[in-house]
């Protein structure tokens, strides 16, 4: 079924709350989640007749994930104000130092990596999807997903070990 034949207004009314929850879960900010939700539906409209998808909920969930991750990347690359970034950090976590350390760690882990690997990691480790579900969402085989997540886990362990050595020195 082509997406063009579907009613965007109907999709927005039916799946808008799901898309908003997904964006809010990743962004932890109501206003930014609303903006990301709008971005997701704009991307759907722009893709128009080029999409062929039987399950619009899965497609919109994936688009919402990408829209939220795009906003996170933009926020990290171009913080409007360093003080504002600090305030967001304070608001997002009770352990500011731990939150900032985790953010730096993830930045180094995924900084030069493949975008789809980051999405796979979020879907599997944060959202709790099975390897099969992640493979379906990303259009890869289960073994391909397993291999990328294993490499990501190994890279994380190497980074953590390197941080431990620096702290001991």
Image: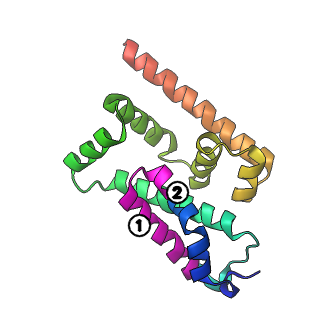
The residue depicted at 50 percent of the width and 63 percent of the height is 67
Q: Quadrant of the N terminus?
A: bottom right
Which of the marked residues, 2 or 1, is nearer the chain's N terminus? 2
In the rendered image of this protein, does residue 42 appear above or below residue 105?
A: below
For label 1, the residue is 35
Using the numbered discs, state the Cα–Cα distance from disc 2 to disc 1 in whole angstroms: 12 Å
Q: Which residues are magenta?
A: 22-46
* 10 Å crowding of disc 1: few (<14), some (14-19), many (20+): some
Q: Between residues 6 and 119, which one lies in front from this camera angle?
A: 6
Q: Quadrant of the C terminus?
A: top left
Q: Position of residue 4 (x, y in %)?
A: 66, 86
Q: Secondary structure at mark 1?
A: helix
Residue at the top extreme, as displayed: 168
Q: Between residues 151 and 131, which one lies in front from this camera angle?
A: 131
For label 2, the residue is 21
Q: Is residue 70 magenta?
A: no
- Asked if residue 167 lies left or right of residue 21, the reply is left
């Amino acid at each position: 079924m082509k997406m063009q034949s579907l009613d965007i207004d109907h999709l927005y009314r039916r799946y808008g709350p799901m898309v908003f929850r997904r964006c809010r879960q990743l962004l932890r900010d109501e206003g930014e989640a609303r903006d990301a939700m709008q971005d997701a539906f704009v991307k759907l409209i722009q893709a128009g007749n080029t999409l062929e998808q039987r399950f619009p909920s899965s497609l919109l969930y994936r688009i919402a994930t990408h829209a939220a991750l795009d906003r996170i990347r933009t926020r990290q690359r171009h913080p409007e104000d360093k003080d504002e970034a600090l305030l967001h950090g304070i608001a997002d976590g009770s352990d500011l130092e731990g939150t900032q350390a985790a953010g730096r760690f993830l930045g180094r882990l995924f900084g030069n990596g493949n975008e789809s690997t980051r999405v796979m990691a979020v879907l599997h480790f944060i959202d709790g999807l099975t390897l099969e579900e992640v493979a379906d969402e990303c259009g890869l085989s289960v073994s391909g997903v397993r291999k990328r997540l294993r490499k990501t886990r190994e890279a994380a362990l190497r980074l953590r070990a390197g941080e431990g050595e620096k702290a001991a020195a």
